[in-house]
Image (cartoon, rainbow, N blue to C red):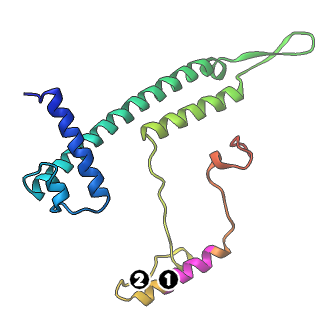
């Protein structure tokens, strides 16, 4: 049976005070926490865990709503750009004669960016694989038994990294801002 509105409000106030005290570093067995009405420090711990779990569930629901709203916005934008990106339009010469049929490449780029945004929003992209290799591209020799060996490997990596040219692989962060080279 659900708790009454008054009981829910009392619990919310007690948990808010408990959280404030814990943020200050007050221990669970401190009299200020027990004075909130907890029978023991264990009861306070359990109540705080329940409060944090409830908060996490509420945040997850809010994130789900936000993701749904963003997907709906992306749907509307994609619907607007799709026809220009997929249906060839006539290219006219000076006399108004059709000389070719082509799709709007800016619309194609817009559609691709919308699709990329949707994939990122929904976690559809595979994580990028990264590999660190040793000298001449081989395996990194490391026995794991000596910290000085690890420090030497880090020094080698730092030295090799300093010699490498900087390459920007993220089109979204280009200086031009449009992702085009």
- Position of 3 compared to 72: left or right? left
Residue at disc 1, secondary structure: helix
At x 46%, y 43%, the residue is 125
Query: Eyeballing the image, is 87 above or below 12?
Result: above
Residue hosting label 2 = 142
Mark 2 residue crowding within 10 angstroms, few (<14) / some (14–19) / many (20+): few
Q: What segment carries the magenta color?
A: 152-161
Q: Position of residue 109 (x, y in %)?
A: 65, 32
Res 68 quadrant in image: top left
Q: Position of residue 59 (x, y in %)?
A: 34, 38
Query: Eyeballing the image, is 153 above or below 60?
Result: below
Query: Eyeballing the image, is 33 above or below 94?
Result: below
Q: Which circle's residue, 2 or 1, is located before the other in the chain?
A: 2
At x 65%, y 28%, the residue is 108
- Position of 125 compared to 179: left or right? left
Residue at disc 2, secondary structure: loop
Q: Secondary structure of the magenta portion, mostly?
A: helix
Mark nearest the camera among 2 and 1 is 1
Residue hosting label 1 = 153
> 123 or 35: nearer the eye?
35
> Mark 2 and mark 1: span between their CA atoms?
8 Å
For the residues labelled 2 and 1, say whether their Cβ atoms are less than 8 Å apart.
Answer: yes
At x 36%, y 83%, the residue is 144
Quadrant where the image shows the N terminus: top left
At x 10%, y 52%, the residue is 43
Is-magenta flag for residue 2?
no
């Amino acid at each position: 049976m659900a708790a009454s509105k008054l009981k829910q409000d009392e619990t919310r106030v007690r948990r808010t005070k408990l959280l404030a005290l814990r943020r200050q570093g007050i221990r669970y067995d401190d009299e200020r926490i027990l004075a909130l009405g907890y029978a023991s420090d264990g009861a306070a711990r359990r109540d705080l865990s329940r409060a944090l779990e409830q908060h996490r569930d509420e945040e997850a629901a809010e994130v789900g709503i936000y993701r749904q709203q963003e997907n709906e916005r992306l749907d509307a934008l994609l619907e607007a750009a799709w026809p220009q990106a997929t249906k060839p339009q006539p290219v006219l010469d000076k006399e108004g004669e059709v000389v070719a049929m082509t799709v709007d490449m800016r619309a194609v780029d817009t559609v691709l960016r919308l699709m990329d945004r949707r994939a990122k929003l929904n976690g559809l992209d595979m994580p990028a694989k990264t590999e660190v290799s040793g000298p001449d591209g081989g395996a990194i020799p490391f026995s794991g038994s000596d910290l000085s060996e690890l420090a030497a490997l880090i020094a080698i990596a730092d030295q090799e990294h300093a010699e490498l040219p900087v390459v920007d692989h993220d089109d979204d962060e280009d200086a031009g801002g449009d992702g085009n080279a």
